[in-house]
Image (spheres, grey):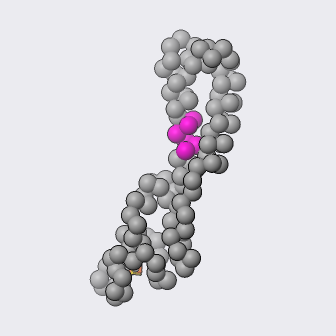
Amino acid sequence: MFRSRRLVVFVGVVLAGALLQAFAGPGGISRFLGVSAASYFLTLLVLAVVAALFAPSAGPVSDHHEADDSWPGGSSEFLCDTCRYNDVRDCHRTERPNATSCEDYRRR
Ligand code: SF4
């Protein structure tokens, strides 16, 4: 679904902040904090960018294939689960379906 953890973190922080503003009563959370709504959202965007920058990116699975930076789609530790050749007719490697390193890997 999402191809970047950083995007997920950014959207999550902005969404959480917007929900706080929308449902924290009259004036929202910004009124509770004693700041204007514009200042609140500007600060929220800055925090979201900082949080996204510090979010862990998916590490490379191997040096010989495309890095899998999807999340949470990268729930499997095996490359074959996301490989376009993951079929007995297409791949005759003995590592299939549990390859953790493969030079023929191609993402679906
Ligand atoms: S090519 Fe490699 S990664 Fe793809 S299915 Fe075969 S063994 Fe798995």
Q: Position of residue 94 (x, y in %)?
A: 34, 86
Identified at 51% across, 65% down, the residue is 68
Image position of 56 (left or right of 39): left
Residue 66 location, quadrant: bottom right
Q: Position of residue 32 (x, y in %)?
A: 59, 14
Identified at 33% across, 76% down, the residue is 97
Q: Which quadrant would the N terminus be assigned to in this image?
A: bottom left
Q: Position of residue 29 (x, y in %)?
A: 57, 19
Q: Main secondary structure of the magenta part?
A: helix
Image position of 83 (left or right of 48): left
Residue 4 location, quadrant: bottom right
In this view, the residue in front, 48 or 61, is 61
Q: Is residue 40 visible?
A: yes
Q: Which quadrant would the C terminus be assigned to in this image?
A: bottom left
Q: Which residues are magenta?
A: 9-14
Identify whether 56 is placed above or below 15.
Answer: below
The answer to if 62 sits in the magenta stretch is: no
Q: Residue furthest top?
A: 26
Identified at 65% across, 28% down, the residue is 41
Q: Residue furthest left?
A: 88
Q: Position of residue 93 (x, y in %)?
A: 36, 87
In this view, the residue in front, 58 or 81, is 58
